[in-house]
Amino acid sequence: MGAVIALENVHKVYDTGEVKVPALRGMSLRIDPGEFVAIVGASGSGKTTLMNIIGFLDRPTSGHYWFDGKDVSQFDRVARAKLRNEKLGFVFQGFNLLKRYTAVENVELPLIYAGISARERRRRAMEKLALVGLSDRANHMPSQLSGGQQQRVAIARSLINNPQVLLADEPTGNLDSKTGAEILAEFQRLNHDLGQTIVLITHEPSIAAAAPRLVTVRDGVIASDVVHRPTLSEVDDHHPKAAEPYAAPHVNGAARELVPVVH
């Protein structure tokens, strides 16, 4: 099966008029369907620029970006918006729920823009709320929900169009550590049970550790790409040793080779 996301020698340069600022410096990255990947880096590392390109919010200055086998590198704003709406789901740090709408109405919103009938919108929205364990909170306003519950509503909304890729940008940033851990467990469950492809963006290594694959960005390049354990879908029940942790050096798109972690 081909990669759902493939970047090859991607550069991004911001031209301020007086100076050109390179944000990405020849980055290459491949993400296959069903992977759960965390991209981690400090402020100014290039991780946000990388997320913007992956999420069709920006495009490379040079290099190639293939999404599901199609070169989308130079798609214009309208074409990128169409892909964004049809292929991606977004979860943000701030939840981005509309305060005057109930949980189920917030989840329905993307379907309104897609022209789906009211009955079908409600059916799908209730299905996604059930998926994240919030069926009994469907008619609650955001102010009546805890932070963790609001983020679960946001996750349900991000899944409403059955996206190929779920992009989560600092999704635990506004949550306490216990609630943040619960949200990370939700992402793990979605990846394991549904095979949902997830790309998690964070500056915290402890948050990134929830994903089986950790990509570290530094100075606009991939400094390391480590698989510290197989994804659960790859673990054979008859071969429990497959669940042992592995590290996979994979710098800037180079081929990965699984090697046991030495503790």
Image (tube, rainbow, N blue to C red):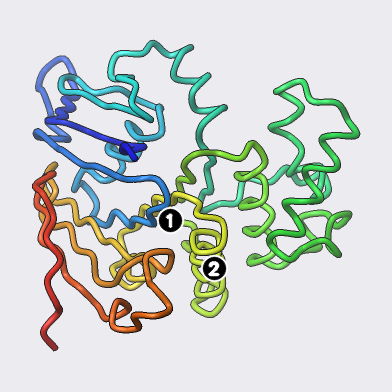
The residue tagged 2 is 175
Type of amino acid under label 1: Glu
Quadrant housing the C terminus = bottom left
Q: Which mark is residue 3?
A: none
Towards the viewer: 49 or 99: 49
Quadrant housing the N terminus = top left
Q: Is residue 180 above or below residue 82?
A: below
Provide residue 233's location: percent of width, then percent of height: 43, 64
- The disc, 2 or 1, on the residue closer to the chain's N-terminal end is 1
For residue 20, which quarter of the picture? top left
The residue drawn where x is 14% and y is 37% is 27
The CA span between labels 2 and 1 is 10 Å
The residue tagged 1 is 170
Provide residue 73's location: percent of width, then percent of height: 28, 19
The residue drawn where x is 77% and y is 59% is 130
Q: Is residue 226 above or below residue 31?
A: below
Q: Residues within 10 Å of mark 1 (few under 14, many from 20)?
A: some
Type of amino acid under label 2: Leu
User: In the shown orientation, is residue 259 left or right of residue 189?
Assistant: left
